[in-house]
Amino acid sequence: MADHYEVLDVPRDADAETIKKAYRRLARELHPDVNPDPSAQEQFKLVTHAYEVLSDPAQRQQYDMGPQAGFPGGFGDFSDIFSTFFGGAAGGASRGPRSRRERGQDALIRLDVTLAEVIFGVTKELEIDTAVECETCSGNGAQPGTQPITCDICRGSGNIQRTVRSLIGNVVTSAPCGSCRGFGTTIPHPCPTCVGQGRVRARRTVPVDVPAGVDTGVRLHLPGQGESGPGGGPNGDLYLEIRVTHDDVFNRAQDDLLCTLEVSMVDAILGTSVTFPALDGDVTIDIKPGVQSSDVLTVRDRGVGRLRGSGRGDLKVGIHVVTPTKLSSKEKDALTAFAQIHKAPPPKIASFQQGIFAKLRDRFF
């Protein structure tokens, strides 16, 4: 492989401006639009590749250092030494070109569901903005009717070998081809839709089956529903992190649903039957006479479906007896008469309690 400085006809200590001027001068002489000679075209490719390397400070430094660039802090792995000196693994085997087809990236999206939806599970249509395979070129990146062609610089190997003088003599080093970026092929006519990438950004709909019993923090795994890979590569995976939104009436304790039912003092004394709407339809419960605040009534199998296993949890209804704060004179007279007949014991001191809701919480949990 010819020396890049010799190709551009510049000294090794040439500055960036000198290298740029040399490239422009040679490009005007060798460009295919100016010089149709096939040999000139080959020389133009060499000039372009030499300029790509020497115009980049990092690539130029690595090129100038030769094999020593592979030993920044020690000799490292033995196979890396062979790779640096001989362009491949130990034993002299050269690396092949890298594939344009790559796996797409995984994606993580948060999905909000209601407490009602997680009772039985739900199917949702999720719209996401992601990379999808280009329909124009079917993912190969080339304009319809054309195909990628073998790189003329590396002859399809994806690597460029060059001989570099060093303290230990002449050694052969290998680096990805700057013309094809290591693919071994070039795309002379890129697809106009994806500009040679094989994929475009688009919005697509993904059906999601949310199982019953999921809770906030649970992640669902959808294989192959992530981004499409470059060059028509396979899709990555999609992960959905569940967040169960707040409900104003019902709370959740594992597979059970919790709510509080306000009962009037009269209904608490005499008993009654109450029908109220739950998350999955109406529920009817019988309140026995003498029910107390903080009593918990259980309705079997009206809770959340179990994520692992069959059946459902329960609905637990905490009773809160509401005492009227304003009474008419007639109501006061009736209650006074009731008190004279009932002869209730006087109030007495009892163990400390942190209110009705604290007691309900202790019963629930």
Image (tube, helix red, strand yellow):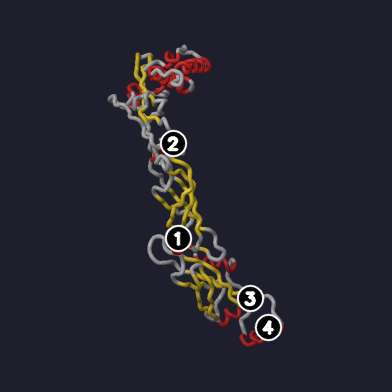
Residue at the limit of the structure toward the right, as seen here: 329
Q: CA distance from mark 3 to mark 2?
A: 77 Å
Q: Crowding at label 4, few (<14), some or many (≥20) Cα neighbours within 10 Å?
A: few
According to the picture, the residue beneath numbered tag 1 turns out to be: 122
According to the picture, the residue beneath numbered tag 2 turns out to be: 191
Occupied quadrant, residue 333: bottom right
Q: Secondary structure at mark 3?
A: loop
Q: Is residue 167 visible?
A: yes
Q: Residue at x 41, y 26 (%)?
A: 179
Q: Is residue 29 above or below residue 140?
A: above
The answer to whether the residue labelled 1 contacts the one labelled 4, judged by CB atoms less than 8 Å apart, is no
Q: Crowding at label 1, few (<14), some or many (≥20) Cα neighbours within 10 Å?
A: some
The picture places residue 277, in percent across and down from the top left corner, at 53, 71
Q: Amino acid at mark 3?
A: Thr
Q: Residue at x 37, y 23 (%)?
A: 160
How many numbered circles are shown?
Answer: 4
Marks 1 and 3, the one that precedes in the sequence: 1
Q: Amino acid at mark 4?
A: Glu
Q: CA distance from mark 1 to mark 2?
A: 40 Å
Q: Nearer the viewer, residue 86 or 8?
A: 8
According to the picture, the residue beneath numbered tag 4 turns out to be: 331
Q: Which mark is residue 69?
A: none
Q: Secondary structure at mark 2?
A: loop
Q: CA distance from mark 2 to mark 4?
A: 86 Å
Marks 1 and 2, the one that precedes in the sequence: 1
Marks 1 and 4, the one that precedes in the sequence: 1
Marks 3 and 4, the one that precedes in the sequence: 3
Q: Crowding at label 3, few (<14), some or many (≥20) Cα neighbours within 10 Å?
A: few
According to the picture, the residue beneath numbered tag 3 turns out to be: 323
Q: CA distance from mark 3 to mark 4?
A: 13 Å
Q: Secondary structure at mark 4?
A: helix
